[in-house]
Image (cartoon, rainbow, N blue to C red):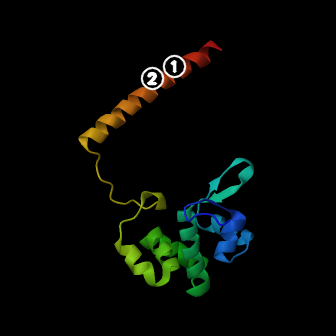
Amino acid sequence: MAKGPNAFRTISEAAEELGVPQHVLRFWETKFSFIRPMKRAGGRRFYRPQDIAVLNGVRALLHAEGYTIKGVQKLHREQGVAHVIAAGLGQNGAAFLESPLDESFGDSAAVQAPSPEQRRRLTEALDDLTSIKARLDGLLTRS
């Protein structure tokens, strides 16, 4: 049974999907600071859909476009992760660049201020969490 498009991928699944060996993905993590898969106990990597999009862009730039590692680093530094992702989208890349970025990609996208109702609910949640933390701290000091 195949995983859904929003499912996390293991390193072997990501490598298979991208058509590169697992050690290449680990190497790219050392060279590109914007590649940050989730790591679980024992260092096991899980790639989110946005991680796969970034990796696909890096693969396209390195293998199809002929960029060097330093070239991809410079492109990311100057134009952001959106351009790296767009490279992996090929023909659809221009449309992606015109759409607003999602915060999970790591670039600073325009974030809309919360409405007064959202602000009130967030403040209530923060107050609840602060109260819970105080109770937990109290329990821990008794031990």
Estimate the x, y position of residue 84 in percent, counting from the top left. 50, 74
- Compared to residue 8, the image places residue 87 above or below, namely below
Q: Residues within 10 Å of mark 2 (few under 14, many from 20)?
A: few
Query: On the image, which quarter does residue 1 sit in?
Result: bottom right
Q: Residues within 10 Å of mark 1 (few under 14, many from 20)?
A: few
Question: How many circles with numbers are drawn on the protein?
Answer: 2
Q: Hey, which residue is sitting farthest left in the picture?
A: 116
Q: Secondary structure at mark 1?
A: helix
Q: Which residue is mark 1?
A: 135
Query: Is the C-beta separation of discs 1 and 2 under 8 Å?
Result: yes
Estimate the x, y position of residue 42 in percent, counting from the top left. 75, 49
Closest to the observer, 7 or 47: 7
Quadrant of image for the C terminus = top right
Closest to the observer, 117 or 5: 5
- State left or right for residue 98 relative to residue 86: left
At x 37% / y 60%, what residue is drawn?
109
Q: Which mark is residue 23?
A: none
The Cα–Cα distance between marks 1 and 2, rounded to whole angstroms, is: 6 Å
Estimate the x, y position of residue 90 in percent, counting from the top left. 49, 83
The amino acid pointed to by label 1 is: Arg
Q: Secondary structure at mark 2?
A: helix
Q: Which residue is mark 2?
A: 131
Estimate the x, y position of residue 117 in percent, counting from the top left. 27, 39
- State left or right for residue 42 relative to residue 79: right
Q: Is residue 25 visible?
A: no
- Compared to residue 18, the image places residue 26 above or below, namely above
The amino acid pointed to by label 2 is: Ser
At x 68% / y 57%, what residue is drawn?
45
